[in-house]
Image: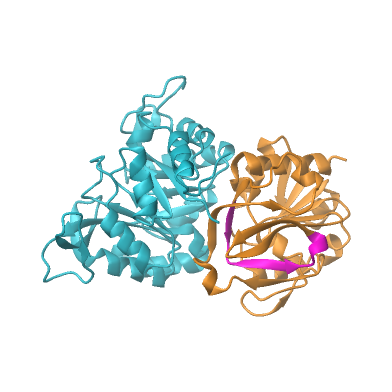
Chain colours: A cyan, B orange
Amino acid sequence: MLAKRIIPCLDVTLDDKGARVVKGVEFVNLRDAGDPVELAKRYDREGADELVFLDITASPEGRRTMIDVIERTAEQVFIPFTVGGGIKGVEDINKILSAGADKVSINTAAVKNPELVKEAAEIFGSQCIVVAIDCRRNFDLDKGKYFVELEDGRRAWYEVVIYGGRKPVGMDAVWWAKKVEELGAGEILLTSMNRDGTKDGFDIPITRKICEEVNIPVIASGGAGTIEHFYEGFVDGKADACLAASIFHYGEIAISEIKDYLARKGVPVRLE
Amino acid sequence: MIAIVNYGVGNLKSIAKAIEYVGGEVVVTEDPKTIMEASAVIFPGVGAFKTAIERLNTLRDIIDNLTVPILGICLGMQLFATESTEGGLFKGLNYIPGRVVKFPDWVGKVPHMGWNTLKIEKESEILDGIKDGAYVYFVHSYYMETDDEFVLTKTDYGIDFVSGVERGNYIGFQFHPEKSGKTGLKILENFLRISKR
């Protein structure tokens, strides 16, 4: 049986020292704690099943730096890794995969040009095309296509947002998830803006709904704050993988603690 | 020197870097002379069956006569089979009698992608230090059916499919050792040791 995956996400930016992971890092015993490659190695050793790098600069300099990060990571980290952020076309994807990444994550560009998903899947294979969907609850029930019941009994639909969650586009997230599957996406990285950064737990209603509606793996993202949240994401949300950033960077929770807990509760996880 | 045979587009960097990481020297090539002189050869795991076999058929004089250890990864392992049903019906290299077929829909999500476990069916030097139940990383929609005598490992994904094979100097894995963390690096280390004999 497939193991449920735990995925640390590294938001990579630029400063005068080069590529850095933002949100602060408080690991001890790291010579250069903010270096994405050092962090990637550390997460690999701690049992991460996969890694996601997000280029949050979305600038040409950021992209060039990211290629260097990918190349250095590929030399030392031997688990799958995905690169996202600012990908606009096939040429960007080709550069990232050629540098040694296993998958790319496309977000805004897929919304603006859905054909890109199809084209990329045909050229590179579905297995390396992840579509990231950012969404937000919308209570205007005259719009939307797929409605879900929230924890408090209210009904809502989830609207797709782009440009890092700033711009709503009026599109239903469940509909979009089904659409990208049809276009050839191999995986969905789902972030609920209602939970992102809150540490209140993953957005279970939308995670579950999308997992039930599509037949490709779904990565739940946004809101992880405790070990139990991961259990909920896998069991209640039916997610195939759970992603988190800050709780790992700050060392609040170790990946091994989450995995031990999940294993005790009967969730299949990879233990080395 | 280990030759990684280049038969199309895709990420060959990962396998090359992993071999270097465990102390081997590699060259990514499609040059007949380089392949002939290599101490071991790897058929990597990227691309479609048809494209790969067409490229490999131009090298058949060389590769059919190799006596050094040959490691097939993912698609590379499938190429060892007699035939494949991926995108039509195509003849493989026929180094290991077998047929490559697609997972039936009822097993669940296809491609089978992620970490799954190995059931060790037969002892082999390539599996030295690998425990039964070890997790490795898979990305594939097709798998190989073959005789039990060639089976090294199986994996459960709705059905028990063959995830590792060995026949003489041919070793094949359906998973990606270069993406399977410590377990995968150990297997590549074993392969390197076998290739130095």
Q: Position of residue B70 (x, y in %)?
A: 79, 53
Q: In terms of depth relative to the viewer, which is nearer, B155 or B37?
A: B155
At x 79%, y 63%, the residue is B148
Magenta region: B137-150
Predominant secondary structure, magenta span: strand
**In this rendering, position of residue A143 left or right of residue A190:** left
Q: Is residue B7 visible?
A: no
Q: Position of residue B120 (x, y in %)?
A: 72, 51
Image quarter in which the C terminus of chain B is found? top right
Residue visible at 49% across and 58% down in the picture: A128
- Vertical comparison of A176 with A66: above or below: below
Q: Nearer the viewer, residue A60 or A155?
A: A155
Residue B125 is at least partly visible in this image: yes
Left or right relative to A247: residue B67: right
B108 vs B188, left or right, is: left
Q: Where does the image place residue B33, in percent across and percent down from the top left? A: 83, 54
| Residue at point 57%, 73% (across, down) | B104
Point out the image quarter for the N terminus of chain B: top right
Q: Residue B112 versus residue A117: which sits nearer the camera?
A: B112
* Residue B146 falls inside the magenta stretch: yes
Picture quadrant of residue B193: top right
Above or below, comparing residue A157 to residue A271 in the picture: below
Q: Quadrant of residue B85?
A: bottom right
Residue at coordinates 49% horizontally, 64% vertically from top-left? A126
Q: Give the farthest residue toward the front.
A: A265
